Amino acid sequence: MNETSLFSAAFLTALFSSGVRQSIPLIYGSVGDTVSERSGVMGISLEGEMLFGAFFAYLFALRSGSLWVGVLMGAVAGMLSSLIVAVWSVLFRQDQSIVGIMFNILATGFTNFLNRMIFGTSNANISIDTFQPIAIPGLSKIPVLGEIFFNQDILAYLSVVLAAAVFFVLRRTKLGLQLGAVGENPRAAQAAGIRVYRVRILSYMFCGFAAGVAGASLTLSTVGTFTEAISAGRGFICLAIVILSRWNPLTALVASFGFGSIQALQIRLQVQGSALPYQVFVALPYLITVLVLALAGHNIRAPRELGVPFEKESR
């Protein structure tokens, strides 16, 4: 691979178009976690919820023959699995980080077990059709930008709608004010009549729903099958995106595209050949995540009660 091909218009167009596809699960995951963390609940278990979403989306899409049934069941799987974490960390007031890490370990083992029990030692040859790109009339004809942003599949377009809708809810509605109050000062919120436990549990279930769709996008938009540990650390990248975006869903949308483009770059560099070991390219997105957090993570103010268990005061 020479320098000319690396910076050619065709290479960059293909790279950023792939970056959009790689960013889809990151957008869903980071937007969902933004809602959860604004209410004070950390989304450490995003990785596991993505795995459940990816597996059940693939399973039901394969069995039903419908990609939309797969998306729905992936979202439901992510939401129901998040309920376990929400009850354990919110109602039982356990450490959210420990509960999240334990859940991720459980999800990895359980989805691997289900995959091997249902499909045997390998289901690599059992693939399904994936969502196909939909060219937006007019916009898709714009040079370069049209191919990158306006010739994607339906889940990509819906992820942008989700980010915009969540931004509106957080900034312009009573529900958004309640979420912010619960995350900043839950005792004052309780005194004002807000049901803190309910808000936190429902916000985390929304996070699980979004994470389930993120997992579904991996199997139904990207590879067309389920492989063990398919989420590959994306849940943790979503956590970094939420911090860097300062809990703003629209900023998270842009940041997700940046991280997705980095993932697309490491894949293309591997395909085109390099003297470096492939492990370097696999680790590249995560190394850059750590570097960006180290350089840009200063003076970022999280919701005041993020990760702090709330104990309801008796009246």
Image: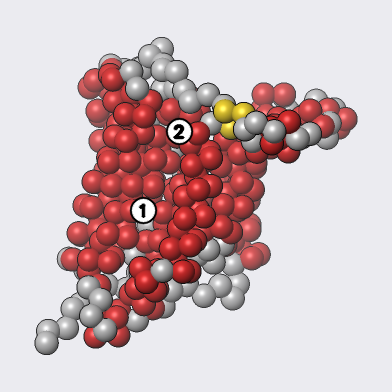
Q: State which quarter of the image contains the C terminus.
A: bottom left
Image height check: is 147 above or below 79? above
Residue under numbered circle 2: 218
Residue under the image location 65 percent in, 64 percent down: 295
Position of residue 303 in the picture relative to residue 310 (left or right): right
Secondary structure under the numbered disc 1 in the rendered image: helix
Secondary structure under the numbered disc 2 in the rendered image: helix
Image height check: is 122 above or below 163? above
Where in the figure is residue 15, as x and y percent of width and height?
70, 33
Residue under numbered circle 1: 207
Q: Judge by depth and name the residue closer to the eye, 162 or 10.
A: 162
Of the residues shown, which amino acid type is indicated by label 2?
Answer: Leu
Where in the figure is residue 200, as x and y percent of width and height?
28, 65
Q: Quadrant of residue 293?
A: bottom right
Where in the figure is residue 246, as x and y percent of width and height?
54, 66
Where in the figure is residue 65, as x and y percent of width and height?
33, 18
Residue 124 visible to the viewer: no
Which is nearer the N-term, disc 2 or disc 1?
Answer: 1
Real-space Cα separation, disc 2 to disc 1, in angstroms: 17 Å
